[in-house]
Image: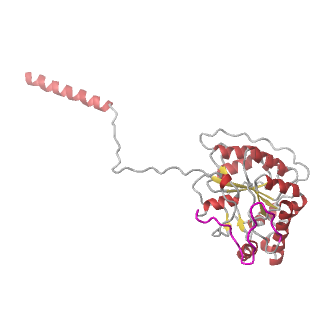
């Protein structure tokens, strides 16, 4: 009898202990076999101190830049527009953002005061041809004339020679590209963020959504300062990118930052090209043109986690004097 009671006692005790263990969470202590040194996050550069010259080992074509920090460039094509471009400049000035403007030569010649203001407020100017034709369907002489006339118009308006060009529709042949680089010293600037703000139906919300979704470190954003809806999208778009940690640079600054730091001297694109003019000095209109440094100048609508949605203001009626836009038919021929 005693043996039975003892056995029952031990069985009961074991059952109680098992129940207690089952109700207690299992804890695991994770240990590293060897200490691991955490990599520090790279610091964002001070864009005011980034150089605005093209390094000798630059690439011929850029659609983005390889950088490990949230540094980006926003660009605007086809202007200047006498009404919309000044409105955009006001928005950029309020936010202390510098952009790159690829100017159409006939518009630069028509509105030189706007070009002068663009440069005076620290933005960069690039060559976007005289009348926005498709380079791949043109002769060598015609392409050179388009670029030279625009180069001269920009220099005449603001005293600064462009360092970059963007072929209309992003289309340029390999032979053309090599000749343009050799003759003018220009690098071709394409893009990796395209909100297709030229395409009908135009919408400020569509511009905002696409830029929000596509932008990443080193992005070059394509926009047009000749469309009312694009300008209407900019306050929310710029504020959203800033809130997400992005910092804006001009295209030459982005290229300079993505280039090995030991390369700091300006490029001399061709043996026949005179040395670049000093900072702030007027560029000379010679052939080949002087490559002088410019002055300092998403399907989801909901932003990234932790960022409140930004309301996009409704577009208003287009102002007078809006410049010509890119036609849908020609834009369809655009290279990616």
What percent of the width, then of the height, locates residue 246? 64, 49
Instruction: Report if residue 262 lies within the magenta region.
Output: yes
Q: Quadrant of the N terminus?
A: top left
Horizontal side, residue 70 vs residue 327: left or right: left
Indicate whether 217 appears above or below 300.
below
- Asked whether residue 92 is in view, the answer is yes
Judge from the rendering whether residue 131 lies leftward or rightward of residue 37; answer left or right.
Answer: right
- As rendered, which of 153 and 50 lies closer to the eye? 50
Where's residue 244, x and y in %?
Answer: 63, 45
Q: Splitting the image into 4 quarters, where does residue 116 fall?
A: bottom right
Residue 64 in sight in this render: no
Q: In the depicted view, which residue is nearer to us: 210 or 322?
A: 322
Colour scheme in the image?
secondary structure
**What secondary structure predominates along the stretch shown in magenta?**
loop
The residue under the point 83% across, 47% down is 87
Q: Closer to the camera, 169 or 110?
A: 110
Queried whether the magenta region covers residue 88, the answer comes back as: no
Q: Which residues are magenta?
A: 261-285
Residue 215, above or below 166: above
- The percent position of residue 19, horizontal first and vertical second, equals 28, 29
Which corner quadrant holds the C terminus? bottom right
Q: Quadrant of residue 129?
A: bottom right
**Relative image position of residue 62 (x, y in whole percent):** 67, 64
């Amino acid at each position: 009898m005693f043996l039975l009671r003892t056995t029952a006692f031990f069985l009961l005790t074991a059952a109680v202990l098992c129940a207690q263990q089952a109700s207690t969470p299992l804890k695991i202590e994770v240990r590293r076999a060897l200490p691991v040194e955490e990599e520090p996050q790279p610091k964002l550069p001070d864009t005011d101190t980034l150089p605005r010259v093209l390094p000798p080992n630059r690439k011929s074509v850029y659609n983005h830049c390889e950088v490990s920090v949230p540094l980006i460039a926003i660009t605007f094509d086809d202007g200047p527009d006498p009404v919309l471009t000044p409105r955009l400049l006001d928005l950029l000035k309020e936010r202390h953002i510098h952009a790159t403007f690829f100017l159409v030569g006939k518009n630069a010649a028509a509105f030189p005061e706007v070009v002068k203001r663009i440069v005076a407020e620290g933005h960069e100017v690039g060559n976007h041809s005289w009348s926005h034709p498709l380079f791949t369907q043109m002769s060598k002489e015609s392409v050179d004339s388009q670029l030279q006339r625009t180069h001269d118009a920009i220099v005449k308006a603001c005293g600064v020679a462009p360092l970059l060009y963007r072929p209309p529709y992003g289309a340029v042949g390999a032979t053309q590209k090599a000749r343009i680089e050799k003759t003018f010293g220009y690098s071709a600037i394409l893009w990796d963020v395209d909100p297709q703000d030229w395409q009908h139906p135009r919408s400020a919300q569509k511009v905002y959504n696409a830029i929000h979704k596509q932008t990443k470190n080193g992005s070059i954003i394509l926009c047009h300062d000749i469309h009312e809806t694009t300008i209407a999208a900019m306050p929310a778009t710029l504020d959203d990118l800033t809130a997400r940690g992005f910092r804006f640079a001009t295209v030459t600054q982005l290229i300079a930052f993505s280039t090995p730091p030991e390369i700091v001297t300006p490029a001399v694109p061709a043996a026949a090209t005179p040395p670049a003019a000093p900072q702030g000095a007027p560029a000379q209109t010679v052939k080949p043109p002087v490559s002088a440094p410019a002055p300092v100048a998403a399907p989801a609508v909901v932003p990234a986690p932790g960022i409140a949605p930004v309301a996009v203001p409704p577009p208003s009626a287009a102002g007078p004097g809006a410049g010509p836009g890119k036609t849908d038919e020609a834009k369809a021929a655009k290279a990616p």
